[in-house]
Image (cartoon, rainbow, N blue to C red):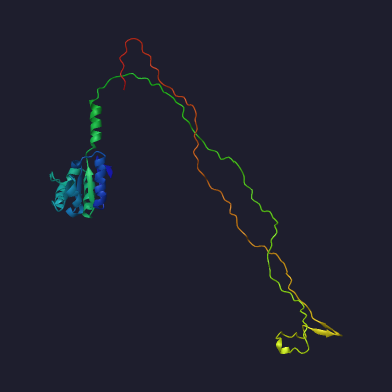
Amino acid sequence: MEKKEGKLIGLFDAQAPLLIQVGQLKAAGYEEEELFVVSKHDEQIDLLIAHTAVHIDTQDRDNFKGKLISFLAGDDITKDAFNRMGLGEEATDYYFQQVELGKLLLYTSSQPVAAIHSETELQAEPQVDTEEQSLALHEERLSTDKNKTQTGEVQVHKQMVEEDKEIQVPVEREEVVVERRSASTSKTDHEEPELTPAQVYEKGDAIHIPLTEERLDIGKKQVVREEIVIGKRKVKDVQVVNETVRREVADIEESGVVNRVDK
């Protein structure tokens, strides 16, 4: 809302914000009976009509369009909503056009009750001529400032550590089996596979059988065992500071007859 020619005036698109504004004005000390609402139709402000004591002017209740024409023509219309506003012709026409477009008009020319009481009290307070001198009293107050200071440092590096590892790996090897058989023993009684020429060969009066075995070929490779992530975080603490502060107090000494009034 805005102040215009001594009036507090506001335009609203819907009833909800208008109701909120009425509540805020009441909280500020305005009386409902001193608030005026102008709209085109009753249904635009049905809740306001039903639950408040705000003054209502609508086209449904009276032909305020005809009243406006008469008002602009200079006729004396005491009940006209725009006449109560007490604005000039240009402002009156502007607000009429806004209401015709569906806007809701809220205005008041009164003051909050608290302001009226305050003004009355000021007027009722007797005027006394006084001669005053002021004495400023000072006090010390604590002030704090913060500076960042390095309190430590962390260094992270890698080093190689040696340790013994033991693993068990199965391996195969060949052994010579010497078996003696009698000449009468049939070969069919034994189904062991015969050695191939690649596995056995004769040289002179001797038979040569090569023997083989599996031997480990040991190698090493580096793999990622784990990963270390290092970062910082901020932790908030509260530090209690105890200091002695000083303040000045007034020491009033009276001598003789003194009429003293404490305010």
Picture quadrant of residue 220: bottom right
Total numbered badges shown on the rendered structure: 0
Looking at the picture, how far across and down is residue 150, in whole percent? 59, 41
- Residue 37 appears in the picture as rendered: yes
Residue 75 appears left or right of 123: left
Which quarter shows the C terminus? top left
85 or 156: nearer the viewer = 156
Residue 228 appears left or right of 199: left
- Residue 9 appears in the picture as rendered: no
Looking at the picture, how far across and down is residue 34, in whole percent? 19, 41
Q: Residue furthest right?
A: 204
Residue 49 appears left or right of 129: left
Residue 223 appears left or right of 108: right
In this rendering, the answer to whether 21 lies above or below 117 is below
Looking at the picture, how far across and down is residue 261, in whole percent? 30, 19
Which quarter shows the N terminus? top left
In this rendering, the answer to whether 215 lies above or below 263 is below
177 or 162: nearer the viewer = 177
220 or 67: nearer the viewer = 220
In this rendering, the answer to whether 49 lies above or below 258 is below
Q: Residue at x 73, y 89 (%)?
A: 187
Looking at the picture, how far across and down is residue 232, in whole percent? 56, 48
Q: Residue at x 17, y 47 (%)?
A: 56
Q: Residue at x 18, y 47 (%)?
A: 51
